[in-house]
Image (cartoon, rainbow, N blue to C red):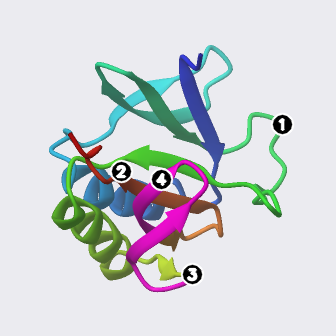
Amino acid sequence: MFSHVILGVNDLEKSKQFYDAVFGALGMAPGVANTTTSGVKRYFYRSATGSFGITNPINGEAATHGNGSTIGFAMQSTEQADAFHDAGVANGGTTCEDPPGWRDGSVGKMYLCYVRDPDGNKLCGMHRAPKAA
């Protein structure tokens, strides 16, 4: 359904450090610089399932986070989710919601971890429990 997600940030290099760390925990390469035709610098992280970018807002105004918004990332294991969360906290992010752990939901058992990036955007790492055979 989605091809990419781009978040506005206020300190591009500080945010790059944060996202390099959390995506590095997922085995992804550091962000690749890209400049728009209007001269705005941004970074992209690419995987087989889509692209994620960070940018200073093109209109020159301050970036703000969406209240109630969450961007979820698929995790291959609980260990990878913990590494994603820990890398975020160690690189300028803050933990939020409940501590990382298993939750029972209407769609089954999930291991969730939540962290806010340096601009307050909420990210979720989610690992679904394997279905019983």
In this rendering, the label closer to the viewer, 3 or 4 = 4
Quarter of the image for residue 122 reads bottom right
Counting residues from the start of the chain, the first of labels 3 and 2 encountered is: 3
Q: Nearer the viewer, residue 61 or 110?
A: 110
Q: Are circles 3 and 2 on residues that touch, CB within 8 Å?
A: no
> Is residue 39 positioned above or below 37 on the image?
below
Secondary structure beneath label 4: strand
Residue shown at the point (50%, 70%) measured from the top left = 114
- Provide the secondary structure element on which disc 1 rests: loop
Alpha carbon distance from label 2 to label 1: 38 Å
Total numbered labels: 4
Q: In the displayed structure, does residue 41 sit left or right of residue 31? A: right
The residue where tag 4 is placed is 108
- Labels 4, 1: front one: 4
* CA neighbours of label 3 inside 10 A, class few (<14), some (14 to 19), many (20+): some
Assign the N terminus to one quadrant of the image: top right
- Looking at the picture, which amino acid does disc 1 mark? Asn
Do tag 4 and tag 2 residues touch (Cβ < 8 Å)? Answer: yes
Residue denoted by label 2? 128
Query: Callout 4: 10 Å neighbours few (<14), some, many (20+)?
Result: few
Q: Which circle's residue, 4 or 1, is located before the other in the chain?
A: 1
- Highlighted range, magenta: 96-113
Q: Amino acid at mark 2?
A: Arg
- Which mark is nearer the camera, 2 or 1? 2
Classify residue 125 as left or right of residue 6: left
Depth-wise, is mark 3 or mark 1 nearer the camera?
Answer: 3
x and y percent of residue 115 in the render? 49, 71
Badge 2 local density, few (<14 within 10 Å), some, or many (20+)? Answer: some
Element type at mark 2: strand
The reply, left or right, for residue 31 in relation to residue 123 is left
Gap in angstroms between the C-alphas marked 4 and 1: 42 Å
Q: Which mark is residue 59?
A: 1
